[in-house]
Image (cartoon, grey):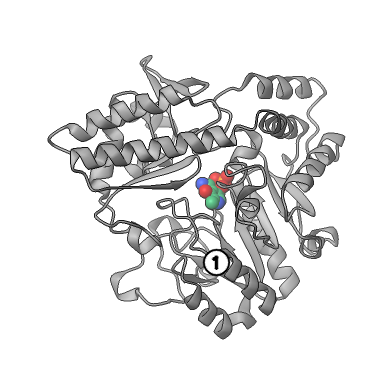
Amino acid sequence: LERAKKVLAAGVSSEFRKYNHPHALFYTHGKGSKIYDVDGNEYLDFTLSQGPLILGHSHPEVLEAVHQESLQGQLYAGQHAKEIELAEKLQAIIPAAELMRFCLDGSEAVQTALRVARAKTGKQKFLRFEGHYHGWLDNVCFGISSPSPEAMGPRESPQMHPWTQGLPDGAKEESFLLPWNDLDLVKQHVAKHHQEMAAIITEPVMCNNGCIPPKEGFLQGLRALCSDYGIALIFDEVITGFRLGLGGAQAFFGVKPDMAVFAKAIGSGYPISAIVGKKEWMEEISTARVIHAGTMNTGNPTVAAALATISILERENPYPAMFALGERLRQGLRKIAKETGHQLLVSGIGPVVHTGFTSQEKAVDFRDVLQFDTTKLKTFVSRLHDRGLRVIGRGLWYISAVHTEEEIDQALGLAREVLTAQDI
Ligand code: PMP
C-alpha cells in the first residue's frame, strides 16, 4: 500500500475507497472462479471484476480468439470485417438492436445514447432514478447519493454525491431524479415536464444499490409513456446485458426500449461496449448529427473477445444453470440467516444476488436500500474475505458460467461460519 500510494492517487481502487475494506487488497491473477492475492491466498470470486467475467477469469477460448485476432494486426479506429460480424450477431439476439455502434465501456456508451436522445428530440433533460448508476462521465455521474430526509417527495434537482465535485454546473441541473418503481409518480412528472425531457434512462433491474427487479408493469409503463410523449426510453443494460440472457433484460421482460447500452459481460472483460437502438434513433449517428469517435473503439481483438463470448454462451447456454445457482445461493443464505437470527434481506434476479442487513421484508426502491445497515454489511463482507470468499463491497454477488454447485455450497458454509459468530 505504501508503494502504491507513491504512484497511484489514493493507492487503492475505488472499490476499496468506497466500501472501506479493512485491508488494502492487491491481486496477482485469476483463473476460472478464483483469484489470488500477493500473499498467495486463494479466493472464491463472486465479484467477477465488477461483473464482466461471465465466463470466469481467463476463459481459454476467449484468450485464444483474442490472440489469434491480434496476430492479424490491431485494427483500431477503422472499419474491419469482424466489427460487422459482431453487429450482425447482436442484431440477431438483442430485440432493440436494429443499428448499433461500439465503444470501450459503459459510461461512454451511455453518454452517446443520451446525446442521440437530445439530438433527435431537440430536448435537453433526462429523467433518471434514485440509486441507479450510469457511469462516471459528466452528464451521468450525479444524483447517485442518498435523498435527504426532507426531500422525500419528487425533486427536480439531484442531491450531489461528493464524487461529483468537478462536474460542470450544467450537468448537475440536467436531470429529473425520481424514486424507482413508482409509475404514478413518473406519469405525473412526465405529463408536467415532457417538453423538456429527451430521455428516460433506467437500469431495467436496479443493480447498483441493492438488486431490485422492476415492479410488474413498471417497464411496460415507461415504454408507453415514452411512446406517447416522444421521449427516448434508454435501458442501461451494462449489468443485465448477457447476464439475464443474451438479449438482456429487454428480452427477459419483453419490453423494447428505443436504445440500450451493453457493456461489462459482452467482452468477457475486454474493453468493449455497445450502444444499440431502433433505426429511427440511431440514425442520428448515421447522419452525423451525433459524433461517434474514439481511437481505440472497435479494435478487432476486442471484437473477437465479444464474438467468442457470444459463441460460447450460445453453444453452452449456461443460463438455466446460472439461474439455478443464483436461487440455490439465495435460498441457502435465507435459511442460514433465519437459523442464526439475522435480519438479512437476500434478493436478486437469476445469477445476481444481493445481501443487505435490514428488518424490511422487501426493498422496492433506493429509499429502502438506505435503511440497510452498512456497518454490518462491511463486517460480513470483510469476514467472508478473510475466509477466502470475495463479494462486491455493497453486498452484490455475481455468479458466472464456471461457478459450480459445490462452490455455492462452499460459499454458504463460509457465510454460515461468519453469521454464527457472536459479534456480528
Ligand atoms: N451503467 C451501469 C448500470 C453500471 O453498472 C456501470 C458500471 N458499474 C456503468 C453504467 C458504467 O460502466 P463502465 O464502468 O464500463 O464505464
Q: Residue 327 at x, y = what percent?
A: 44, 39
Q: Secondary structure at mark 1?
A: loop
Q: Residue 82 at x, y = what percent?
A: 82, 34
Closest to the observer: 103 or 234? 234
Which quarter of the rendered picture does the C terminus lie within?
A: top left
Closest to the observer: 112 or 94? 94
Which quarter of the rendered picture does the N terminus lie within?
A: top left
Closest to the observer: 292 or 284? 284
Residue that label 1 marks = 217
Res 245 quadrant in image? top right
Q: Is residue 284 left or right of residue 379?
A: right
Residue drawn at x 50%, y 60% as measured from the top left: 214
**Residue that lies at the very extreme toward the bottom in this rendered image:** 192
Q: Is residue 337 left or right of residue 64?
A: left
Q: Residue 248 at x, y = what percent?
A: 63, 48
Asked whether the viewer can see residue 78, the reply is no
Compared with residue 381, is residue 406 higher up or lower down, i.e. above or below?
Answer: above
Res 302 quadrant in image? top right
**Hey, what amino acid is under mark 1?**
Gly
Residue drawn at x 74%, y 45% as measured from the top left: 93
